[in-house]
Image (cartoon, grey):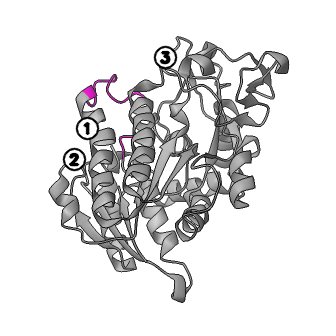
């Protein structure tokens, strides 16, 4: 089996490539990758991926010809995106660039799959869920972290286990979320219209060593690297207390699911599934600061109580449907993820400068 990973030099793409190449000899796939290397830090993965056996191509998904040059594959894992919830509104990228990267790129990949009858796995996001609905959740503070309160008042698709697939996807979801939601629908339609299998995995926060660590994309990595380096940190919004909660998942826990999906493309289970760390692998910023304090020593964290667009108090993925469909479970506890990032921060003290 030959697999193409888009965004192969990003944190998630490169992590998945390495995991796929660890498959036992008889089942080990050929892995190809494409990346435009526009993201600061992505070039650091090029040499290691090639040495591991990845057929790596420098190309841009917005240019259909770059994909055509890759040759036939059996599956595409789409890990390419501008993954910032603030993309297109923070002045770093234009709104057009976000749509071109995240939606036009998906369109070109789907045309590529159509031409080769290749299966398609889209790594989507928890950010397809309605910001307005998330921001209005009734929450309370317990142990320095938000948690849902008033169970009887929770909206459909939300419980103490987290956000399920039935939760609202009504706008606003951010430009990033909108492009991923549109990509999901487009992928499902292409799969039915042109007869190739499609799986859509809505991922929570993916985290681990080597993540590029921007605050709006990899908060766990950003916080730990910044804490160790003595860089300024602030609790933004929600009163400036750092009670907002996210769950995290290591990409190596995602890899077995993707392998199972590619090996059993006709399984009669839902095509759109949440993949996240869940409540057990979740943490507030305040709790993360306590962890960093124990690991690196004390420091002061600033506070900016003003709310910020697209922020939500509690974003935890409920993967119950996925667990039932694929017998999948989280293998890497959050403590191990954080320690892995901390070790990487110690070994790479200039990492935040390197990755911009």
Q: Nearer the viewer, residue 270 or 34?
A: 270
Q: Residues within 10 Å of mark 1 (few under 14, many from 20)?
A: some
Reading the image, the residue beneath label 2 is 62
> Mark 1 falls on what kind of element?
helix
Coordinates of residue 199 in the picture (x, y in percent) = 51, 54
Q: Which is more N-terminal, label 2 or label 3?
A: 2
Disc 3, SS: loop
Earlier in the chain: of badge 1 and badge 2, it is 2
Residue with the mark numbered 3: 308
| Quadrant showing the N terminus | bottom left
Where residue 156 appears, as percent x and y from the top left, is 71, 24
Q: Please name whichever residue, 17 or 140, is drawn nearer the observer in this view of the structure.
A: 17
Quadrant position of the C terminus in the picture: top left
Q: Nearer the viewer, mark 3 or mark 1?
A: 1
Give the residue number, with chain letter if any, for mark 1.
100
Residue drawn at 52 percent across, 46 percent down: 221
Q: Is residue 209 magenta?
A: no
Choose the circle earlier in sequence order: 3 or 1.
1
Residue 41 placed where, x, y %? 33, 53
Cβ–Cβ below 8 Å for labels 1 and 2? yes
Q: Is residue 187 left or right of residue 39?
A: right
Nearer the observer: mark 3 or 2; the answer is 2
């Amino acid at each position: 089996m030959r697999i193409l990973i888009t965004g192969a030099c990003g944190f998630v793409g490169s992590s998945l490539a390495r995991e796929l190449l660890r498959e036992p000899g008889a089942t080990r796939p050929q892995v190809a990758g494409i990346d435009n290397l526009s993201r600061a830090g992505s070039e650091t993965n090029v040499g290691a991926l090639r040495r591991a056996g990845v057929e790596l191509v420098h190309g841009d998904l917005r240019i259909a010809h770059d994909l055509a040059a890759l040759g036939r594959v059996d599956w595409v894992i789409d890990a390419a995106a501008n993954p910032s919830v603030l993309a297109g509104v923070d002045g770093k990228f234009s709104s057009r660039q976000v749509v071109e990267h995240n939606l036009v790129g998906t369109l070109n990949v789907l045309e590529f799959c159509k031409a080769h009858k290749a299966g398609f796995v889209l790594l989507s996001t928890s950010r397809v869920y309605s910001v307005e609905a998330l921001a209005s959740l009734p929450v309370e503070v317990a142990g320095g972290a938000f948690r849902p309160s008033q169970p009887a008042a929770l909206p459909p698709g939300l419980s103490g286990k987290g956000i399920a697939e039935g939760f609202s996807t009504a706008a606003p979801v951010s430009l990033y979320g909108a492009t991923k939601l549109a990509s999901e629908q487009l992928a499902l339609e292409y799969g039915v219209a042109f007869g190739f299998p499609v799986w859509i995995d809505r991922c929570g926060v993916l985290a681990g060593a080597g993540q590029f660590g921007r605050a709006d994309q990899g908060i766990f990595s950003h916080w730990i690297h910044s804490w160790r380096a003595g860089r300024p940190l602030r609790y933004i919004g929600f009163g400036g207390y750092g009670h907002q909660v996210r769950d995290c998942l290591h990409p190596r826990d995602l890899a077995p699911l993707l392998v199972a999906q590619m090996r059993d493309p006709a399984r009669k289970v839902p095509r759109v599934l949440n993949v996240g760390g869940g409540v057990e692998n979740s943490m507030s910023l305040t709790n993360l600061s306590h962890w960093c304090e124990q690991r690196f020593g004390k420091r002061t964290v600033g506070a900016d109580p003003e709310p910020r667009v697209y922020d939500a108090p509690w974003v935890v993925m409920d993967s119950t449907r996925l667990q039932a469909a694929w017998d999948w479970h989280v293998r890497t506890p959050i403590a191990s993820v954080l320690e892995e990032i901390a070790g990487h921060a110690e070994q790479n003290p200039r990492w935040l400068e390197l990755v911009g």
